[in-house]
Image (cartoon, rainbow, N blue to C red):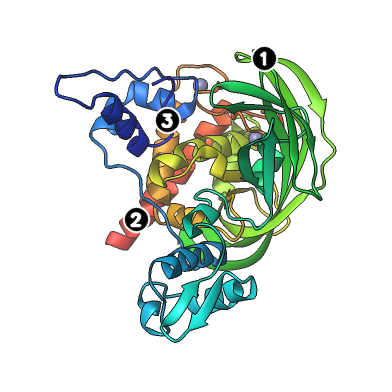
Amino acid sequence: MAGYPGTIISTMQQAGRAGRGKGESIATLVGFHDPLDQYFMKHPDALFGGSHEHAIIDLSNEYISAGHAMCAAAELPLRLPDDEAYFPALLAESLAALEHQGLVKNTASGWVYSGRGRATEAVPLNALSSQVFKMPCEGRLLETLDRTRAYREAHKGAVVLHEGETYIVEQLNLSSGIISVSKKPVDFHTEPIKTVDLRVIQELETQQKGALTVSFGAVEVVEQYVGYKTLRYDQVVGTESLDLPPLRFTTTALWLTVPEAAVERVVAKQLDIAGGIHGAEHALIAVMPLHVMCDRWDIGGVSTACHPDTARPTIFIYDGFEGGIGLAEKAVELIADIVTMTRELVRGCSCDVGCPACIYSPKCGNDNKPLDKEAAIVLLDELVAHMAKANRLNAS
Ligand SMILES: [Zn+2]
Ligand SMILES: [Zn+2]
């Protein structure tokens, strides 16, 4: 395996698939620069001994609920209220929305699927937003992408990898939803650069851990894809700007409001607080997929030395899917483990000032600036200490 596949589940699955048969076999995982890859190289027990990730499904997300209800109706007629046992949150609303789109019909035996084609094929497993972009090439449909992925992976100039061949995006047409590509063998790849603004809509849960506040709630995210980098292997060989309208969506997020004492410790050591918060945010996002089953691209982060909605230094981690699919919610439950492992990762990294295996992020919209590894360690130490203290108080 060239690089950690992203989840322990798929690592085991890939190894198992290659090793199918009667004889013994060996699977080899070569770690990349990424924090989780490097974490496993240093802590193989976490890969072999640990439990696998928590799979997430959030049936209170209207997009997910509607997709599942439609597929269920294609198998057997759905009946209200009996089948609410399986869809406790939104079954009636989902059926009404699907009926409106002509995808289900209420019959004497219950709600049945009435769309064209197979229902399961109409529900993407990893895409939720309603607008679908199509990528045709030479009379074939290469891919369908949701809005977020289209902006991220199929902007003008992007290199798209499909079945081992490379394609260059010539145009991303936002009104027709057509992505024009041409097949071209190239030895480089592209990575988008985006900036993110985030606004708290409603705080739904607050946990006080000493002076540290962990919150969960609804947020509005505005992602602006401002450009992209061209990379040959790991070297940046060019940067281009992009002219795309902002992507605006509501989702769920968790946020950590950094205690005053932690800020004071960073300042007393003459370290950079903004660089520390930013570094801690990157490392938290890198570690989160080990605890909550997702890809690092499925979650986003924003960190600032003073956020207008909290008036404090704050690290936000948001669910990258419209409406949220439960990633941030699960992470709140596991926050103590996530923060502890993040501290181990950054502390244990042998680099001096930060590297892709700890606080650098390939998806940083600020080009990995500012970053301060020492400040990140001081902050993470403080976060872990506050959580441990709060746990001791709870236990006693
Ligand atoms: Zn490092
Ligand atoms: Zn960043």
* Horizontal relation, residue 213 to residue 305: left or right: left
Q: Residue at 53%, 16% (x, y): give it.
A: 352
Closer to the camera in the image, 110 or 158: 110
Crowdedness of circle 1 by 10 Å Cα count: few (<14), some, many (20+)? few
Indicate the secondary structure of the residue bearing disc 1.
loop
**Quarter where residue 201 is shown:** bottom right
Q: Marks 2 and 3: in contact by CB < 8 Å?
A: no
- Earlier sequence position, callout 1 versus callout 2: 1
Q: Name the front one of labels 3 and 2.
A: 3
Q: Position of residue 145 (x, y in %)?
A: 63, 44
Q: Is residue 142 above or below residue 57?
A: above
The residues bearing labels 1 and 2 have C-alpha atoms spaced at a distance of 53 Å
Tell me the kind of residue under disc 1. Answer: Val
Crowdedness of circle 2 by 10 Å Cα count: few (<14), some, many (20+)? some
The residues bearing labels 1 and 3 have C-alpha atoms spaced at a distance of 24 Å
Tell me the kind of residue under disc 2. Answer: Asn
Mark linked to residue 5: 3
According to the picture, the residue beneath numbered tag 2 turns out to be 391
Q: Name the front one of labels 1 and 3.
A: 1
Q: Is residue 304 above or below residue 108?
A: above
According to the picture, the residue beneath numbered tag 1 turns out to be 186
Q: Is mark 1 within 8 Å of ligand 2?
A: no
The residues bearing labels 3 and 2 have C-alpha atoms spaced at a distance of 34 Å
Q: Residue at 45%, 37% (x, y): give it.
A: 287
Q: Is mark 2 within 8 Å of ligand 1?
A: no
Closer to the camera in the image, 40 or 152: 152
